[in-house]
Structure formats: structure tokens, C-alpha cells
Amino acid sequence: MITALMAVCLITAQAFSQKTYQVSLPGSKGSLKAVVHIPKLKSGVRCPFVVVMHGFTGNKNEKMLIQISEGLQSRGIGSVRFDFNGHGESDGQFEDMTIGNEIADCKAVIETVKKIPGVDPRRIGLLGHSQGGVVTGMVAGELGDKQIKAIVQLSPAGNIGDDARKGKLLGTRFDVANLPATHDVWNHKVGRDYLKYAINCDMYGTAAKYKGAACVIHGSADKAVPCEYGKRFADGYANAKWVLQPGDDHGLSKHRPQTLHTIYSFFSKNL
Ligand code: FER
């Protein structure tokens, strides 16, 4: 009896405390390493939940992504930060990574997190930086607003498609008519499938199908992705908030408190 009572107390206590823990989740190329943030919850109450995605060559432990997850957590919103296939601690080779298989990773993560106790599967949001911002927009467009309630794109790299079609990626060049087996970008080798997907995918057309709440944040001094590419995503959505941050860079480091505030208030309102 006493043991049973203690167990009840323990379960109740757990239901109230916030927790952060590492997990492996199934993805497109094996397992994805992730960190889950669950806010303090009242017994029987479920939280809205955001899937947080890094950019090209990035990882789940970038300072801004940790700040975002922790800030959401303290405001009653859960999240998961994960490494895409071929990045960080996740399975897969960088050379095999494509925007297409990152989209598959994201969809697999959404399915898994919906089953976490305490997560409200009807209130799922997405947030992605740069290439992860492209994945965010495309997954939202493909799944629709019944499944994805709100999205935030940070410096979304819409130029990857335009650049790749011209045989350019981040200041490097390749032959579009004769795609190389691998191509060096930022000291990483992307494979031919990466280039093919980038050339052929309709990121703006796919994202524009999304009818839910969208917020796009971009710095006017972003050198990796000119802010016009972020504006173009915002212009395509039926329901978008466009935030241009004067003088800010690709990593949105110049106006960080403002960036975080915009993200928290957007998800608090729309999720
Ligand atoms: C490119 C433009 C932007 C590119 C990548 C990016 C691979 C994205 C950068 C990021 O995710 O931070 O041409 O080529």
C-alpha cells in the first residue's frame, strides 16, 4: 500500500516537472540523435511541440537552437532538436544527404514525437534554420495545416535551388550538364544526388501550399542567403509574418534576443 502510494506520488511529481533527455529516433538513413525538451506540465495536460532543425553542415547543439528549445520549454512548449542524416551524431554519410532525405527525416521525427506522453499531436510546429528552413517549408506544404499548425523559417536557403541550377553552391562551381559524383562545399563533399535534388525540387511551389501560420525571419546582411529568398517564402504563404532584421547575419547573431522573442511569441500565439 505504501509502495503504491509512493508510486502515485512519483508519477504525479513527474507529470509536473520539466525534463530534457537524449534519444535516438528512426530516420531516413538509420537512427537520428536528438534531444527532447518537455516543459513543466500539469497532470493530464498536453503541450504544443516544435521540431527544431539545423542547416547545411550544422547540428542540434548550435547555441541558437539550444536557446530556442530552452526558451520554448520555459514557456510551456516542448521541442526536439535533432541531427539530420550525415550530420552530427546521426547515422548516414554526408555524401548521401539530400534535401529530399532530410524531408523524410523530418516526417519520421514528427511521427515519433506525436507519441511522446504529454505531447499534443494536434499542435505540432516546425522551425528550421537555412537548409533546415527549406525543409520546414516543404514539409509544411506537403503535410498541410491539419498536421502542422505553425512554422518558423530562419534565414531559409531558397537560393540552393536557383544556385544549383546555375552550377553554383556557396561560391563554388560545378558542371550542371555533367554532374560530378561529389562536389566540395564548405569542406564537405555533397553527392550527385544532393545536386540533382537541389536542381529539380520546387521549394517555393511546395512551401506555398501551406495554409497555416508561418513566420520568416531574415537578416538584411546575410551573405550566405540574401534576404530576398526569405521574403519570397513569406510572399508565397497565405498567412505569413515577415521579419527583416536590419544588419543581421546568416546566423541571426546580431539581434538574438529579438529573434528569440519573435519565435516565442509566434509559437505561443499560433500553436
Ligand atoms: C547554397 C546556399 C545556401 C548552399 C547552401 C546554403 C549547399 C545553406 C546554408 C545553410 O544551411 O546554412 O548554395 O549550397
Image (spheres, helix red, strand yellow):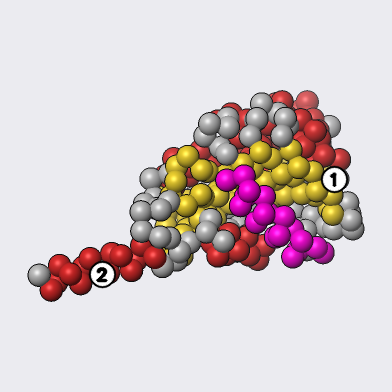
**Circle 2 — which element?**
helix
In this rendering, the answer to whether 22 lies above or below 126 is below
Q: Name the residue rendered at 77%, 49% in the picture.
A: 217
Look at the numbered disc 2 and say if its residue's Cβ is closer than 8 Å to ligand 1.
no
Residue 7 visible, this orientation: yes
In this rendering, the answer to whether 41 lies above or below 196 is below
The answer to whether 17 appears left or right of 51 in the picture is left
Q: Which image quarter: residue 58?
A: bottom right
Taking the magenta stretch, the answer to whether it contains residue 256 is yes
| Magenta extent | 254-271
Viewer-nearest residue: 129 or 50: 50
Residue 228 lies, in percent from the top left, at 86, 40
Q: Name the residue rendered at 73%, 32% in the picture.
A: 237
Residue assigned mark 2: 9
Residue 63 lies, in percent from the top left, at 65, 66
Q: Earlier in the sequence, mark 1 or mark 2?
A: 2
**How packed is label 2: few (under 14 Cα within 10 Å), some, or many (20 or more)?**
few
Viewer-nearest residue: 181 or 4: 4
The answer to whether 24 appears left or right of 143 in the picture is left
The N terminus appears in which quarter of the rendering? bottom left
Residue assigned mark 1: 227
Residue 27 visible, this orientation: no
Q: Name the residue rendered at 52%, 43% in the picture.
A: 124
In this rendering, the answer to whether 21 lies above or below 192 is below
Query: What is the number of the mark on residue 54?
Result: none
